């Protein structure tokens, strides 16, 4: 079992690193970057547990810092302390918090969410697949809210400048726009892939 877990962890780690440093991992969408890197973390957390999930989330956060440093977008100041915050001439160490902490939390959520939902679904005699889809969907929504919420709170003025928002309500609308556009697309994709990949991998691990 330890060998299987180590092997799967290495595979997930390789997928994360490969995605992070190719155009598929972080996709430029103007102000923000969409990502698919959260998906292997969700799958790994369900299969290998929250500790491995959190470790892979940490790696996700570190790659985010590197990518936003070497290939910055308008909001890269919120993910890399090397990128000057809009309106200033220097970066912020709070960018490390935004880049890493929500991603570590991302690694914990799927395991406990799946366990909780699956117990509820089992009582209703529903299959495993709806639970997996909901886990991927809800985890992605939570991750998006944690990241965008952290940016809006910590980098309030700079974020307002980036999205041309002149009031708190305009900032809130900007966050919701991200949530219901690329956030929704990421969530649906995560739900579909999690539903398809987790069952066969669970059989391998539990064999």
Image (tube, rainbow, N blue to C red):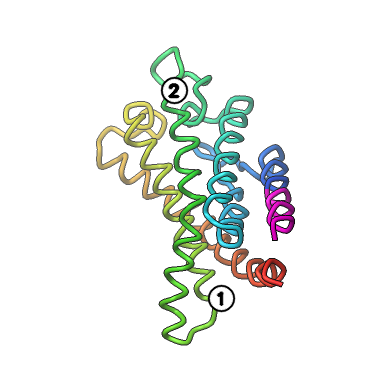
Report x, y in % for residue 76: 51, 29
Q: Which residue lies furthest to the bottom in this view?
A: 125
- Residue tagged 1: 129
Q: Does residue 187 lie above or below 101 as drawn?
A: below
Task: Identify the residue at horizontal 40%, vertical 45% (top origin).
Answer: 146
Badge 2 density bin: few <14, some 14–19, many ≥20, Cα 10 Å: few
Q: Nearer the viewer, residue 188 or 201?
A: 201
Report x, y in % for residue 73: 55, 30
Q: In which quarter of the image is the C terminus?
A: bottom right
Q: Is residue 204 left or right of residue 51?
A: right
- Marker count (numbered): 2
Q: In this view, does 28 lie to the left or right of 95?
A: right
Ranked by sequence position, the earlier of labels 1 and 2 is 2
Circle 2: element type: loop
Task: Identify the residue at horizontal 50%, vertical 43% (top origin).
Answer: 103
Report x, y in % for residue 185: 53, 57
Circle 1: element type: helix
Magenta highlight on residue 160: no
Q: Is residue 41 left or right of residue 116?
A: right
Q: Residue furthest left?
A: 168
Report x, y in % for residue 200: 69, 71
Q: Over which residues does the magenta segment extend?
A: 1-12
Badge 1 density bin: few <14, some 14–19, many ≥20, Cα 10 Å: some
Q: Does residue 56 lie above or below 3 as drawn?
A: above
Q: Which residue lies furthest to the top in this view?
A: 89
- Residue tagged 2: 93
* The label number, if any, that marks residue 200 in the structure image: none
Task: Identify the residue at horizontal 44%, vertical 76% (top origin).
Answer: 119
Q: Distance between the residues labelled 1 and 2?
A: 41 Å
């Amino acid at each position: 079992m330890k060998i299987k877990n180590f092997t799967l962890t290495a595979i997930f780690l390789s997928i994360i690193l490969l995605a992070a440093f190719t155009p598929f991992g972080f996709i430029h969408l103007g102000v923000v970057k969409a990502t698919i890197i959260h998906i292997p973390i969700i799958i790994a957390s369900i299969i290998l547990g929250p500790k491995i999930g959190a470790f892979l989330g940490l790696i996700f956060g570190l790659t985010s810092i590197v990518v936003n440093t070497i290939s910055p977008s308008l909001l890269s100041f919120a993910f890399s302390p090397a990128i000057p915050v809009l309106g200033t001439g220097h970066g912020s160490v709070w960018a490390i918090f935004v880049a890493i902490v929500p991603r570590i939390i991302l690694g914990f959520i799927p395991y406990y969410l799946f366990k909780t939902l699956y117990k509820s679904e089992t009582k209703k005699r529903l299959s495993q697949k709806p639970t997996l889809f909901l886990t991927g969907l809800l985890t992605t929504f939570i991750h998006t809210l944690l990241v965008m919420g952290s940016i809006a709170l910590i980098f309030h003025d700079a974020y307002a400048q980036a999205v041309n928002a002149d009031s708190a309500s305009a900032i809130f609308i900007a966050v919701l726009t991200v949530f219901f556009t690329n956030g929704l697309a990421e969530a649906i994709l995560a739900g579909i892939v999690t539903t398809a990949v987790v069952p066969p991998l669970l059989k391998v691990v539990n064999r």
